[in-house]
Image: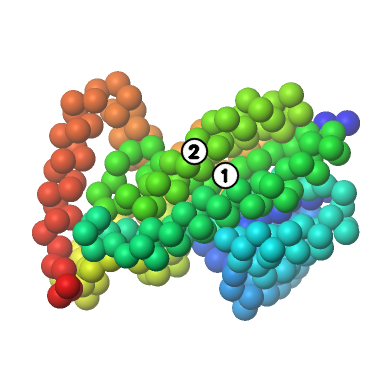
Amino acid sequence: MAVSRRSMSGRHALVTGAASGIGRAVAEKLADSGAVLHITDLHEDGLRETRRAIEARGGIVATAHPADVSSLDDVRALAELVHAQTPAVDAVLNVAGIAVWGTVERLSHEQWRSAIEVNLMGPIHVIECFVPAMIHGGRGGHLVNVASAAALVGLPWHAPYSASKFGLRGISEVLRFDLARHRIAVTLVTPGAVATPLTGSVQIAGVDTTSAQFRRLRERFEGRAVSPEHAAERIVEGMLRGRYLVQTSRDIALLHGIQRYAPPVYALIMGVANRLVSRIRWDAP
């Protein structure tokens, strides 16, 4: 029997990046809908707090195990724990990620590699370890890949981040059709600004993050940011309705529309954006 596209009650869901931000909000939203949760994150303390919060409101957390999604061994160990409790999960939600920005001449090789290892190879590891069991189980289900607006448009300084997120977008586009015959719906999420701890931990190569210019830029970002709960609402709703592309903010939906239907206007907007951020003071080389 295929999993209902409209309900997760009693169904098993894996959520990565569940210690904070969008991942935690998604886990809580799914738990409120009756799902049995399997959650993971690199940060064990935050993961325990998410479990406590979900269970305090009556939700079910079957697994709360720390794992580094960039490590295939970690994800395989997580899959063994989860599959000991259920032959296959009904939904996989790849939320874990890091933000790495900077201009090409200032980015280190390690920053390029970390963006790819966490944001691209991480979801690949999760897909590799969990989706085949979903296929063999024959129950259908959902695969949700949380990418970014940087998977759609050329945001300034986002080259490593966009490389990882465009890659995840490409995987999602292929699996959207590859998995359809198995009744596994694929959803690609492209959030814009979301008020999560990620905004405070973003790596920006060579930028003086204490400068007045950078503080103003962060304030503008935060002023446009939606809450993690709003993003989670859109994500879970889009997943259950079988939508392929889910956007959590109107500004990104508008910019993506301009990119598609008015390319010269899009190029003008991005050129202006690039000139604006280039005014931020750099640290000494």
Q: How is the image coloured?
A: rainbow
In the image, taking residue 260 as reference, residue 230 lies left or right, namely right
Residue at 28% across, 66% down = 205
According to the image, label 1 marks what residue?
145
Q: Position of residue 203 (x, y in %)?
A: 35, 66
| Amino acid of disc 2 | Arg
Q: Earlier in the sequence, mark 2 or mark 1?
A: 1
How far, Cα to Cα, is label 2 from label 1?
8 Å
Furthest residue in direction top, as rendered: 261
In the image, taking residue 239 as reference, residue 207 lies left or right, namely left
Picture layout, residue 262 above or below residue 285: above
| Amino acid of disc 1 | Asn
Label count reads 2
According to the image, label 2 marks what residue?
169
| Image quarter of residue 183 | top right
Residue at 57% across, 30% down = 174
